[in-house]
Image (tube, rainbow, N blue to C red):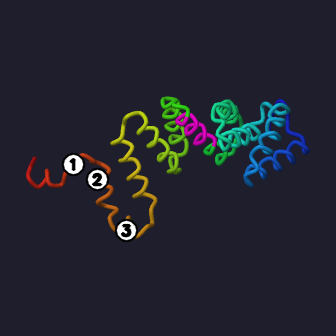
Amino acid sequence: MGEDHPVTPDGRQRLARATALRERGELDEARVLLLELRAEYPDDAHVAVETAWVHDSLGLEEEAVAHYEAAIAGDLSDDELRGALLGLGSTYRSLGRDADSERTFRAAIERFPDFPALRVFLALTNYNLGRPREAVADLVRVLVETSSEPSIVRYRRSLAAYAEDLDRSWLDAATGS
């Protein structure tokens, strides 16, 4: 875990307890325990990401940012890093920090290109940035690539074509306009 202040076995047990509390929705109790752990193990990325997630879940986005940034700077598993990047990008968006959100999501997509949720969240940021066409096109692409819903599968080719040219009217093509 953290190199400067390794988490003790007791600290790991408390972190596991805090994670379980967060997952059960006992957010205030989890937050208290996680803030204690952050004070004891300020360099531990696992403690930081759990602390960020609990703050986000409580609607304390401003407080979550520093914890996300500390977690991302540390040593996380790919699953934790993916979740932390998604959480940070989403938190920036909810705070109106759209440029930071876009930067975070683009870096995350470059690192984890096979995680479509990042592209969906980037689409939401693009909408906020005044790019509704790009946002809708990206959402349609993700839908086409990931859906097994029969009606989407049936029209996959058409939807993919629309995503590539949202402004094109098929009537325009037929009349040569």
86 magenta-colored = yes
- Residue interval drawn in magenta: 84-94
Residue identified by numbered label 1: 168
Give x and y (percent) for residue 21.
78, 51
Neighbours of disc 2 within 10 Å: few (<14), some (14-19), many (20+): some
Asked whether, in this view, residue 72 is left or right of residue 104, the answer is right
- Sequence-wise first label, 2 or 3: 3
- Amino acid type, label 1: Arg
In the structure shown, which secondary structural element does the residue marked by tag 2 occupy?
A: helix
Tell me if label 1 and label 2 are in contact, CB under 8 Å.
yes
The kind of residue tagged 2 is Tyr
Location of mark 3 (residue): 151
Q: Please tell me in which quadrant of the rendered image residue 147 appears.
A: bottom left
Going by the image, does 2 lie left or right of 118? right
Q: Identify the residue under disc 2.
A: 162
Q: Do the residues under discs 3 and 1 have CB atoms within 8 angstroms?
A: no
Relative to 74, does residue 119 appear above or below in the rendering? below
* Circle 1: element type: loop
Q: Residue at x 55, y 41 (%)?
A: 111
Q: In the picture provided, is 87 more to the left or to the right than 30?
A: left
- Near mark 3 (Cα within 10 A), the count class, few <14, some 14-19 or many ≥20, is few
Q: Please identify the residue farthest to the left as the structure is shown.
A: 175
The answer to whether mark 2 and mark 3 are in CB contact below 8 A is no
The residue depicted at 42 percent of the width and 57 percent of the height is: 145
Percent position of residue 87, x then y: 60, 41
Residue at coordinates 29% horizontally, 53% vertically from top-left? 162
Q: Is residue 60 above or below residue 27?
A: above
How far apart in space, not on screen, are marks 2 and 3 (Cα)? 16 Å
x, y percentage for residue 59? 64, 40
